[in-house]
Image (tube, rainbow, N blue to C red):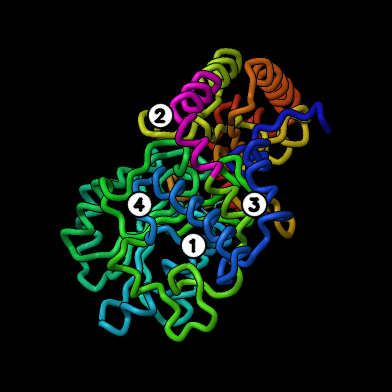
Amino acid sequence: MSDLIYLDYASTTPCNEEVLAAMQPYFTTIYGNSNSLHRFGQEALDGLSHARDCVGRLINADFEEVIFTSGATEANNIAILRTVKTISNGGRPLFATFKPEHKSVLDCANKLKAGGHNVTYLDVLSNGLFDLDSLDNALSNNNIGLLSVCFVNNETGAIQNIRRIAEICQWKGILLHVDATQAFGKIPVDVKELGVDFMSASGHKIYGPKGIGILYCKKQNMKYVKIPRANYEVEFGVRSGTTPVPLCVGMGHASKIAGERMHMDYGHVKALREKLVSGITSRLEEIYVNGAPDSSYPGITSMSFRGCEGEAMMMEANKIAVSSGSACTSNKLSISHVLSAMGISADIAQSSLRISIGRHTTEEDIDIAVDNLIGATNKLREMSPVWDMIKAGMDVDAIFQRAH
Ligand code: PMP
């Protein structure tokens, strides 16, 4: 197990030791309920407030604009479902999002659709970015009340131009929710400069604990997400129940470290990604890096090894832990909705892997990964009838299309 090289940082990260140490007293000695008025409660509340400050500082949000949630999924749910429900009464019922969004956002969209709301799924360009000129037109339907956009795509790393999208939304009176789970703590995010209304982020993607995230909510938008008749309300009336102070403290501390290390972490993953990509593309043909080379977070790379099925690659490249863009369900290979939305051909999409690099990845890890992936590709291609067809110049994509 310890020999396995972890290259799945977009999925989750190990909790930082310093973060763990910061959380520890809040489990054992400062264990009060942050809602209690006695000293135990107030000490816990101090820790919670400090954590809220740390998160706020990282994204330039005010104290009361940071709402702790159980993760980005809950933050997405609150921002999208509650806002659409509230604004529907005012007559702007349409929700819009993009086809390659994270499943948690698409689940909200599907739920709204099933509940009778109008939902629009917007297209992206072949590099995964939004065509900002056509976005202006696509949002012209003046019934759109809320748009949800992913800042950094979790599969390709594509970084969207949030500032420009926010400008378009403001111009049209559309509220903007940004799923910043893969951007938060990794690239500069300033909610005020960007002009977003809501933003979701998660603790476990930035070397913090699992089970904690935040929803940034601009002050004047609180009315959209508050629980109407809350019982035992916490987090400014957006949640109820006892706040998990140790997890909040962990997210606060992880945010502080992420802010301090952002420049260094970014440079580190960028250099390693270049080594990974050049190491593979210089020694193998028919390798595709999916996404937007000029606008992507280098910690996340979607790479297709044509002729090799993604899940087979994961099994064969057994020195590394990565994610596959495709998944085999009910004997049928389902292709990544992200790559499909980008119009990437089925045969290239099904051969994709997501390789994500992080703070603890070393140059040696990348050397091993490169050799392992090259070995796996050569072995699978040797046995692959699809590879033979590709080499013979056949239109394999047409065959894949028929199979799906
Ligand atoms: N959005 C994006 C873009 C993500 O990558 C993830 C995590 N895979 C989530 C939302 C969900 O985050 P959490 O695990 O904190 O619920």
Q: The residue tagged with tag 1: helix, strand or loop?
A: helix
Is disc 1's CB within 8 Å of ligand 1? yes
How many neighbours does mark 3 have within 10 angstroms: few (below 14), some (14-19), or many (20 or more)?
A: many
Mark 2 or 1, closer to the camera: 1
Residue 111 in percent (x, y) is at 50, 74
Q: Position of residue 266 (x, y in %)?
A: 47, 27
Give the number of the disc on residue 210.
3
What residue sits 50% from the left and 42% below the top? 255
Specify whether tag 3 is near ligand 1 (CB below 8 Å): yes
Residue name at image x 35 percent, y 64 percent: 96
x, y percentage for residue 270? 48, 23
Does 391 appear above or below 11?
above
* Image quadrant containing the C terminus: bottom right
Answer left or right for 175 relative to 157. Answer: left
Give the residue type at disc 4.
Ala
The residues bearing labels 2 and 4 have C-alpha atoms spaced at a distance of 30 Å
Element under disc 3: loop
- The residue pinned by badge 1 equals 75
Residue highlighted by disc 4? 61
Mark 4 / mark 3, whichever is N-terminal:
4
Question: Which residue appears farthest toward the top when viewing the image?
Answer: 282
| Dominant secondary-structure state across the stretch colored magenta | helix
